[in-house]
Amino acid sequence: MANQDLPVLVAETNDVRPFARLLRGIGLRHNAVMEISEAGFAVTVEEVRTLCAIAWIPTSLFTSFTYNQPSIPATFEFNLDSLLQCLNIFGNAGPTSSNTATSAVKSKRRWAGEGEVGVDEDNEEYQVSGRKGKERKTGMRMEWTGQGHDLNVLLSDDSRGPTTTCELRTMEPEELMNAQFDPDDMALYVIMKSEWLRDALFDLPPSCTRITLLAHPPKEPIPPREPNATVSSIGRRERRAEVGQFTILAEGDFGMTELDYPNDKEVMDKFDCAEKVKFSYNSSHFALLHRALHQSLKVCLQIEKSGFLCVQIMMPLSENVEIGGHSGILEFKMHALEEDD
């Protein structure tokens, strides 16, 4: 049978939660663009062409993945909010906790897929009105025939439960900015635990409009001592000059917040910085990162010499993922703000 007679995509999984978790992480807008390849999906969302968010979804996330390459690129635009609501149609693939769902209902929804009753993804127990019961999973079979056809999603509530079919309209994709990061022009490369960055973003003042990332390389000359400096502050400055340090700065209505992360094995998995780096970014873009960091393991921050920032967030491994593989990566890219005079 010729390839044109076969569906471009057939993907199956016994548990939609890892898939839904990745999609929620980039739920900045209602519509997204999906690009299908032999490696899996790339789902892209852009926020007013100033922030690009991509969910890299590998084939290892599915129990079965079949891709028949068409004569034209397998790319289409779809309603991300609708897909997330479909995945949670049986209440098994919603936000990470019932508290999240409750708060989302009380306030205006900012994210695609918010506002549905869901599961606690940490202990994988089903929750309804605060009560926990036996774990339930939603299975999925996703099929796309090709350009001009709907995205068909068959969902089943456990192996013996009910099933439902959702048909999502697909559209011609809009042109995306999706600027490419140049690793040969990299000024800073940091890998750290996600919780460090997540907690830092939580502590930043809500009134700040820009967030500054500052990095000092190792073996930097020790700066002159400040008047009335304490012994502990002198020690920190000397330690920073010796090993290097990554700093997050934010100024709010009540002053400056500074969070320091020394180049220490307990904090940093990787710290490459040849010279001092300092760039500022829109704080609203970092606020969007906070949601994506939930349920993740590691975060990688890369900055070009021009200030272009690429943040990659690694999700925990799912079942049947081989050593060296991954269960999805969320990527956020943004340009630096112009410095104030």
Image: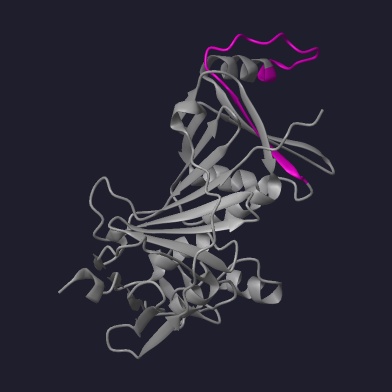
Asked whether residue 162 is drawn in magenta, I would say: no
Q: Position of residue 269 (x, y in %)?
A: 42, 33
Residue at the far front: name it: 71
> Where are the magenta residues, as a range?
208-233
**Which quadrant of the view contains residue 62?**
bottom left
Residue 121 visible somewhere in the drawing: no
Residue 277 visible somewhere in the drawing: yes
Frontmost residue, 164 versus 91:
164
- Residue at the location (80% across, 12% down)? 227
Answer left or right for 114 relative to 269: right
Answer left or right for 156 relative to 184: left
Frontmost residue, 76 versus 5:
5
Residue at the far bottom: name it: 162
**Which quadrant of the view contains residue 151?**
bottom left
Q: Position of residue 179 (x, y in %)?
A: 53, 44
Q: Is residue 25 above or below residue 17?
A: above
Q: Position of residue 164 (x, y in %)?
A: 38, 88
* Image quarter hosting the C terminus: top right
Answer left or right for 215 relative to 17: right
Q: How is the image coloured?
A: one colour
Q: Is residue 268 above or below residue 253?
A: above
